[in-house]
Amino acid sequence: MLNLWNPDHLSLTVGLVTALLLGMVHGITPDEHTWPITFSYSIGSYSTRGGMLAGLVFSTGFTLQRAIASELAFLALAGFLMHTAAENIVYIIVGLVMALSGYYILHRGHAIHLIPWLEKLLPHTDETRPVPLKLAFVHGVIAGWGTGAFATIIYTVISPSMPSAWVGFVPGVLFGIGTLLMQIIIGASFGWWMQRRNLSASSKAFIGQFVSGNTLLYGGALFMLAGILGLVVPSISDWSVKTGIKVHNLHSINVGLILVVLVVAGVGGVSMWLALRKVRRNPVRIA
């Protein structure tokens, strides 16, 4: 019998179906490792198709990571992922990559003199085109190392139940595919919203660059701050207020959920308001 809340002693078929469904729940519920990235790149694409592509590219990297971690779990080598400090370290790394990406998006066409080797690796595009999605894949690979209820179930219950090492990665792949399907829908929704704004193409490009850049830059700073505080004061990572909802990512208010709200609704929402106000006040200059 399927039990997405607390599965245990699963058969092969039920375990694989559970992994896929858990991925879908993970992708559609507010999650600090997916929503801020998908939101940033989807808004930056300012189109439904671009938003879908943003969700696809990000989740492809995420799926790759989950496949690797799932195989490690089958081989009993994923114990380090369950360590309390692991999540905070991932926050710091993800935050750093977010901040660097945000800086690049906000200053495309300008040299990053402090990190010349990084400048050579970044895609060079003009400011009138959608935000490039190549870095979303990197975000997916890094963010996937974050832990939580979903990862714990995959690594400690479903992956170890696989019949051999040849298929130990399959639960991670199915979980990633479930996440991917939902992130494509979410990305398309963000992109569609931007596409429906009655604005010129150049104004949409400006808004996309401004909002996605700020969300990644300042959101990344918030992620790093959360990670550092979690390492210095470990009790912060364990803090939560139960909601009574038996759905992972919704069952409690914790640091992860607060990060989602602060980054997407806070930084992203304020940046969107500022960008729209600027466009409406100076339509000719922006367009």
Image: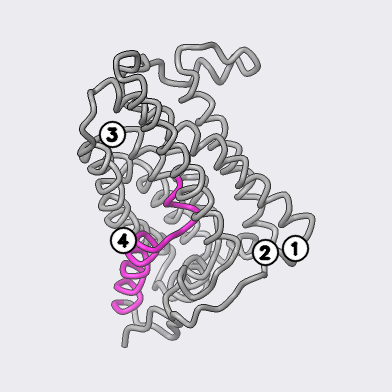
Residue in view at x 57 percent, y 34 percent: 99
Amino acid of disc 3: Tyr
Q: 156 or 31: which is nearer to us?
A: 31
Local SS, label 4: helix
Q: CA distance from mark 1 to mark 4?
A: 31 Å
Amino acid of disc 4: Gly
Mark 4 = which residue?
A: 178
Relative horizontal placement of residue 231, taking residue 249 as reference (left or right): right
Where is residue 203 shown, x and y percent of the image? 30, 24
Mark linked to residue 149: none
The reply to whether discs 1 and 2 touch (Cβ–Cβ < 8 Å) is yes
* Figure check: 21 above or below 286: below
Where is residue 95 shown, x and y percent of the image? 59, 42
Mark 3 = which residue?
A: 46
**Extent of the magenta region:** 13-36
Local SS, label 1: loop
Mark 1 = which residue?
A: 234
* Figure check: 266 above or below 237: above
Instruction: Answer with the quarter of the image where residue 51 lies.
Output: top left
Residue 14 lies in the magenta-colored region: yes
The reply to whether discs 4 and 3 touch (Cβ–Cβ < 8 Å) is no
Q: Earlier in the sequence, mark 2 or mark 3?
A: 3
Q: CA distance from mark 4 to mark 3?
A: 24 Å
Instruction: Give the number of the mark in front: 1 or 4.
Output: 1
Q: Earlier in the sequence, mark 1 or mark 4?
A: 4
